[in-house]
Image (cartoon, rainbow, N blue to C red):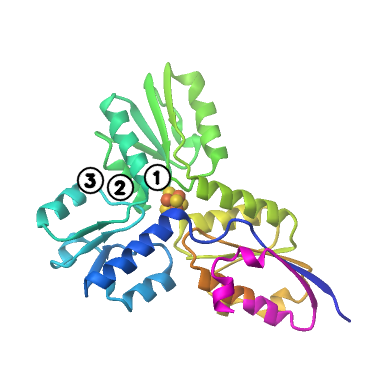
Amino acid sequence: MNQDVKVRIAKNSGFCFGVKRAINLAFEASQEFDKIVTLGPIIHNPQMVAKLQEKGIEPVNNLQEVDGRPVIIRSHGIEKTEYKQLKLMGIPLIDATCPFVSSSQKYATKLSKESYKVIIIGNKHHPEVVALQSYIQGEALIITSPDELDGIKDTKLAVICQTTQQIELLHGVVDYLLPRTKELRIINSICTATKVRQESTSELAKKSDMMIVIGGKNSSNTKMLHHISKKWTDTLLIETADEIKCKELSSKKKIGLTAGASTPDWIIVKVYNKITKCLWDKKKTVTNVEDIPGYREEN
Ligand code: SF4
C-alpha cells in the first residue's frame, strides 16, 4: 500500500554568507598559489576540507607548520598575536575572517579599552572564542550558562557572544546580571545566519516525525541545530548520505531536513537523493527542494 510521505527542507539550510565567502576566497587563492595553508580547518566540515586539499590547500595546526606558504585565515578568525606574527613573516595573507566575527573582535577591543569586565557566552575551546578572547585585555570570563556567574561583583560588565549562540541564553545571562550590576553593556553578536537556521530548524522539527541534521560533527552551529531539533522530534545528525539507513525512515511520514552553516550544497543534495531512493515505493510530497542551493545543477 502506498503511503504518503512528506519530505521538507528547512528554509534556511547550508552555507552562510561568511562560509561562502571564505570558500570562494580559498578557491580564488588556489588559482594564484600552488600550495596554501589554513591555520586549522577552514570550516568545520571534513568533506569540504578534503575537497580543498585536492586544490593544494592544507590545514596546519600552528605557525611553525606554515613553512613560508601563503596563509588563509579561516572564517572563525585567529588570535591577535598570531595575526601580528603572520604579518611579520611577510608571507601572502588571505583574510577570510567572517566580517561578523571581525566586528565582534572590534567590540571586544573597545569594551576592554573602556574598562569593562567582559563576559563571553560561548565554548572556550572553540577557535572563534579563543580568537575573541585575545582581543580583550586581561582575562575574560567565558561561560555557557548563567550558573557560572555565581558571585560576580564588578560594577561595569559587558556581555558578548560567540556568533552561534542561542538568543535565549543571552536573555538568561542578562536577566541574571541586570539586578547585580550598576552598568551592563550588551553586544548581541549572535549572527543572523545562525539565528534563522535555528528558527527554521525548530519550526520544521515541530512539524516532523523525524529530522535529519546534516553537517560536520565538529561544527558548533550544526551541533546546535541537532540540539534544537532533538527537543521536538526524533533527530539524526549525519555528515554524509552514507550514514542514512533506509530502515530508519520506513515508518516516517514527515521527514525534515536541515543543514549547518558550513555544510556544502552537494552534500545536502546527496542526502536528499538518498532519502528519496529509500522511499522509492512510497508516494512522496517534497517541498522546498528548490531551496537547496545547487540542486538544479547537480540533478
Ligand atoms: S555563521 Fe555567521 S558569523 Fe559565522 S561565518 Fe557564517 S555568517 Fe559569519
Find disc 2 in the rendering and name its residue.
131
Q: Residue at x 54, y 44 (%)?
A: 166
Q: Nearer the viewer, mark 2 or mark 1?
A: 1
Q: Determine which quarter of the picture holds residue 117.
A: top left
Find disc 3 in the rendering and name its residue.
80
Residues shaded magenta: 273-299
Q: How many marks?
A: 3
Quadrant showing the N terminus: bottom right
Q: Earlier in the sequence, mark 2 or mark 1?
A: 1
The CA span between labels 2 and 1 is 13 Å
Q: Secondary structure at mark 1?
A: helix
Q: Residue at x 45, y 36 (%)?
A: 148
Whether the residues at callouts 2 and 3 have beta carbons within 8 Å, the answer is yes
113 vs 43: above or below:
above
Q: Residues within 10 Å of mark 2 (few under 14, many from 20)?
A: many
Amino acid tagged 2: Ala
263 vs 224: above or below:
below
The answer to whether residue 285 is magenta is yes
In this rendered view, identify the residue nearer to me: 144 or 38. Answer: 38
Find disc 1 in the rendering and name its residue.
100
